[in-house]
Structures are given as C-alpha cells and as structure tokens.
Amino acid sequence: IHHIVQNGGLYKKPFNEAFEETPMLVAVLTYVGYGVLTLFGYLRDFLRQWKIEKCQNATEREEQKDFVPLYQDFENFYNRNLYMRIRDSWNRPICSVPGAKVDMMERVSHDYNWTFTYTGRVIKDVINMGSYNYLGFAQNTGACQEAAAKVLSQYGVGVCSTRQEMGNLDKHEELEKLVARFLGVESAMAYGMGFATNSMNIPALVGKGCLILSDELNHASLVLGARLSGATIRVFKHNNMQSLEKLLKDAIVHGQPRTRRPWKKILILVEGIYSMEGSIVRLPEVIALKKKYKSYLYLDEAHSIGALGPSGRGVVEYFGLNPEDVDVMMGTFTKSFGAAGGYIGGKKELIDYLRIHSHSAVYATSLSPPVVQQIITSMKCIMGEDGTTLGKARVQQLAENTRYFRRRLKEMGFIIYGNEDSPVVPLMLYMPAKIGAFGREMLKRNIGVVVVGFPATPIIESRARFCLSAAHTKEILDTALKEINEVGDLLQLKYSRHRLVPLLDRPFDETTYEETED
Amino acid sequence: VDIKSLTYYLYWLYCQYELITCSYLMEPWEKVLFYTAHVATVVPLTYAAYLFIPAHISGAFHFFLHLLGNQPESTVSIMK
C-alpha cells in the first residue's frame, strides 16, 4: 500500500509569506549613500594615519606596525567609519523591567559617539517594541513573580555545580517533565543558556562522516554548533524546498565526497521563526521530505514556542502536525516565558544520550532555581493548569496584535517582510542614514525600536524590527502606529508599490512527496 | 502661496537630500567639505549648460531642418 500526500493537502490553512522586492531607485540611492560614506571613511582613515586627526579606535602598537595588519579588513573599516556614526541607537541601557513600557537612561555624546555620558535623567514609559516578550511574562508583579520569590527564599540563587555533579535539583526534574508534557514528546532536558543549547548539543549529535543541511539564514548558535561538530555542512536557500530536495537527492545519490560511502546521518537544521525575516519555516514540506529521504530534523523554536499555534505550543501545533515527526525539538525559555535557558525535547533514548554526552550537561552550571520556577509558572499558565484562562487570553491577544499591526503597517505603505502570523515584524529602511534617523526619531517620540544593519542583514537591506507582545494593548499599538506613520512620512519610508508577488504554494515540477513503495 | 508651508516643504526636501546622501551622519566639517564639493561641481555645470545648450539645440534643429527640407525639392525636380 502506498498513500500519496499531495502538497496541496499538507497545509491546512493558507501560508501567506511575502518579501517585496527592493525598488530599483531605492537600491541605487542606497549604494550612493554607502559610496559617499566609504569615500569619507577613506578620508578619515587617511587623516588618522597622518596624525592630523586624533585616533580614538583600537590600532596596533608602534612596535607591531610591520606585522600583519589587524584592522584593515572591511569589518573593521565598517566599524570605525559607519557603525560609529549611528552607534547611539544600540546598547541603550534600560532601568526597569522590559514589559510593554520600559524606562531608559538618557545618554549624550559630545564627541560623535566615541564616548557616552549619562545626563542622569531617566526617560520614563518608553513603548517597548524591541524586547522578545511575546506573551508578556516579563513582569515584576503577578503569580510568576510571587512563585519565583518563594523559591528564591527557599533555594537561594546559586546552584554552584553542573548538572552531572551536584547541580541536579528536584526543580529541574519537575521542569523537564513539564516541558515534555507541554511539547507532546517523551522526554526533555533543560540547559542554562539558549545559545549554549545549540552550540553544545549539535556536536554531541553529529560528527565527522555526517551531513548537515542548514538553512541560509540560520542563527549564529546553529552555525557555530554545526561547525564545531566537524560534520560536512551544506546550505540550502532560505525556506526553499526545491533547494533542500536537490541537496538531499545529491547527498543520497553521491554519498561522501571522495570515498562515495553513504553518509552516517543527515541532519536538517531549521528554525521555527527566523527573527530577521519574520518568516515561518515550511514545516509540513520539510517533514515530508525528511520522511521520504530518511534523514533527521532539528527544529530550533527559539522565537516560535509560545508565540505560534492556537494554544502556544509552537510551530508544530500551528501547522497541525505530530510532534513525534520532529526528531529534535529545541527551544529557548528566554523569549516567551520571560526566563533564561534552553531545552531539547525528543525521544527518551535521545535525551538520555544527551544527558551523558552533551558538553552543556557536563561542564555548564545548571539553571538557577528562581528562573526554573518562573518557567514552571509561566508554562502552567499557558497550558491553563493554574486554573485561570490567562494563558489562552495571552496567546489570543498576541495573535490579534500580530494581525492588526501587520495589516495597518501594510496599509500605510511600508515594505514589511515575512509571514502574516509571525510576531516579528521587519520594516525595511534600506538607506544607512535612515537607520540612525529612524532610531533617533522614534526615541524622541518615546518609542524604543531595534534597528538592524550590516552585518546581521545584507548590506542594502537594513531594517527596523518590531517584536509584538501580548502585553501591548490596542491603545499602545495605535499610539505606536501613529508615530511610525509620522516618522515614515518624515523620512520617506513608504516604499511599497503594493505589487506583492504571491509565493507559489505549489512547487514547480518534480517534487513529489509520496512515500516509496517497498 | 503660503510662505510657511513652502518653507517647511523646502526644509523637508533638504532633509531628504541629507538622508539620501548620508550628510545627516557627517560631522560639521565633513558637511562643509561635501557641500563645497557639490556646489563647486553643480554651479559651473549649470552655467555651462546655460551658455551652450541653446546654441547646440538651435544648431541641431537647423541641421535636421536642412536634411528634411531639401528632400521635397529634389523629388519635385525629378518628376518634372
């Protein structure tokens, strides 16, 4: 018996993702802007070298001037001459809990962003559109805070040991059982740091002789973990299933590069929501491909756990799929649960293996007890086990906020990337001067945003990234939208020509997802 | 003509120019240098355009007129 799963039947609801193309005039003007700044960068470097201007950045010592130069590559040139000019939009110190509104310390620079001084004033109630606070659990009042305070007085803060030695508390066992129940998997393990979860566990799962297929735009932690493992890495185009299938076919047909032996394991690394694009992975297609070619799937749900799905269980629930189809489900507690740390969920044999062989379990300190209690309380709230419907209300509020915010921004005429349902909203800025101008103008109007440029994005595609939260009420969103509208008119950011290229839901030709008959 | 809105519009145009050419990010002495270079390029260009373009256009116009104007006379003479 073979049953055919047509790709039209894989998606239960429409998958609306759009990446509008850069307008030609805007691209040309962006290059003009970068050209002017590069020329002035060369001029300033020349003046600094000939001691006409004071050199405030790091240089080699006099004795090392004849050695291999350390600061002549493009990254350092960009850092000295372009990043320094707009540096006041980043690393802004906040001095309250990062909820829907936050207090920021005001700082000024008298020497064009080389040094900052605090004026002593605190800017109160800045609308926070930059924190990864998707379900609004970053609070200093409420049930989570009380439970964490109780645990703090009972266990203290420090654990002073690794998981394998003396750092395995009963709280950790409780947390792991809860996480496994939340995700619908057999077993789970929690680690102290989300980045370390990826970078320390991928080397434990794959090694030399294995193949890793990772998405173009994967996070630095996944890339680091893949490189540390020593496996062969091949990159497929972002969210492009034809590219992934081609790589899988080539891997199975040709085997390892010189010896032509079959690969020991093929691991596909994808993320649930990509935080720079706001796009959601095409999970039904990835799972169908994984089953057809018998490879393994590692899903990093850092931004999507708690934020997607009718009850907040992540991207697997959003598409209505079976959690047992994903071999390794990884996620972090930093974003939706208001705590810190990461987890990996999967089959019991896998997690037992990781408990022994993961570097994080052996060498890294385990999670601190108040943090564990925050995760436990927030997870129970989302699941509804604390007896209230607060969790469900938060998940629904986030979904409503997402759809409303994205619709209004698109109506205003901005270019917005990504999927309709993702709470990460990138707004395209393109020109380098507008990056600095947008950050400053929004702060003048009491809204804190995160602007991103090179090297986190391609050089002409700089953007402002809004992270929506369930803690944002409609009034806050309306205020923010009004100000974004004003700033968009002031800075001429409304580039959209309303010619959305609809993404083809059906692949072009040969991709078929039917299982082979045996 | 509303002077206030006109001056605001001109200021807004200047802001756009600053943002596109990234002179918004430059320190004052860099701005002076940049604007001087711009002015030193644009002013002689416009002056040269003002002096030479009318002469060039009228020359081209006479050339094409001569080219097209002669044809009907020659065909008429052959027909005769």
Image (tube, coloured by chain):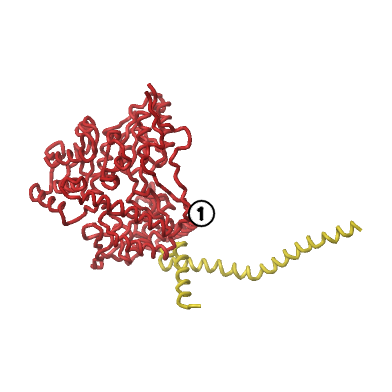
Chain colours: A red, B yellow
- In the picture shown, does residue A510 fall above or below A103? above
Q: Residue at x 43, y 49 (%)?
A: A19
Q: Is residue A66 visible?
A: no
Q: Residue at x 72, y 63 (%)?
A: B60
* Residue lying furthest left: A154
Judged left or right of residue A248, residue A109 is left
- Give the secondary structure at mark 1: helix
Q: Which residue type carries mark 1?
A: Met
User: For the C terminus of chain A, which image quadrant?
Assistant: top left
- In the picture shown, does residue A7 fall above or below B18? above
- In the picture shown, does residue A374 fall above or below A511? below
- In the rendered image, residue A84, in percent from the top left (x then y), is placed at 36, 59
Pick the front one: A373 or B19? A373
- In the rendered image, residue A404, in percent from the top left (x then y), is placed at 34, 55
Judged left or right of residue A148, residue A16 is right
Give the labeled residue for mark 1.
A24
Q: Residue at x 27, y 38 (%)?
A: A329
Q: Chain of mark 1?
A: A
- In the rendered image, residue A107, in percent from the top left (x then y), is placed at 28, 65
Pick the front one: A285 or A425? A285
Residue A410 sits in quarter:
bottom left
User: For the N terminus of chain A, which image quadrant?
Assistant: top left
* Residue lying furthest right: B80
Q: Is residue A430 visible?
A: yes
